Amino acid sequence: MKIILKILALSVLLIGFSACSDDEDVPVVPTLDINYANLNGVWSLTEWNGNPMDGDVYCYIVFDRRNHTFKLYQKFDSMYARCITGGFQLEEDDDWGFVISGTYDYGMGDWNHEYIISDLLATGSMTWTVKGDDTDVCIYTRCDEVPAEVIAEAKVEE
């Protein structure tokens, strides 16, 4: 009987140690609600389709939650930096989730794509995926301001 009790105690002890897992220690980053207020501010495109942005290529977008307008500083589809302005809309779609779309000022038309916004993290990043093309993914990171040299290169007076 003593042997059975020793085996049982050893079994309980071994099961207790094997039940502990490092998976429980994985921190969970809190997310924010996707809304105009939480998009407000300056964002930098830091990753596109799994590749970090090169220093010579950049995109900063400044969202104004009150007017639903944006100011886009970019240098990736031209050898020259540009500042583009317009308006944006944020809608919740039953199938896609939160979708952002936009229209450029001065009759330049709509954005090429609508984007599904996901993973708006409290640490200051968000993911945009082209609606209908889950292979086209951008990561934006919140920043304090558009760098002065970017504004100067785009020849915009603030």
Image (tube, rainbow, N blue to C red):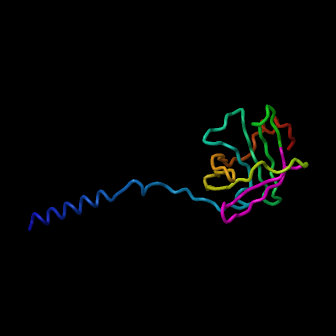
Q: Is residue 45 magenta?
A: no
| Place of residue 49 in the rendered image (x, y in percent of width and height, measured from the top left) | 63, 42
Per the image, is 94 magenta? Answer: yes
Quarter-of-image position of residue 47: top right
Image coordinates of residue 50 in percent, x first then y, are: 60, 41
**Going by the picture, which residue comes out furthest to the front?**
132
Q: Is residue 137 left or right of residue 70?
A: left
Q: Which residues are magenta?
A: 84-105
Residue 6: quarter of image: bottom left
Number of marks: 0
Between 81 and 112, the residue placed more toward the observer is: 112
Q: Which residue is at a point 82% across and 51% down the rendered structure image?
A: 110
Residue at image coords 12%, 65%: 4
Which residue does the image show at 55% across and 56% down from the upper left?
29
Q: In the displayed structure, would residue 121 be above or below residue 150?
A: below
- Please identify the residue farthest to the right as the structure is shown: 106
- In the picture, the quarter occupied by the C terminus is top right
Q: Residue furthest left?
A: 1
Q: Residue furthest bottom?
A: 1
Residue 140 to residue 152: above or below: below
Q: Is residue 145 above or below residue 119?
A: above
Closer-to-camera residue (75/39): 75
Residue 146, horizontal then vertical, whole percent: 75, 43
Q: Residue at x 81, y 33 (%)?
A: 80
Give the prevailing secondary structure in the magenta stretch. Answer: strand
Quadrant of the snapshot with the N terminus: bottom left
> What is the x, y in percent for residue 54?
67, 34
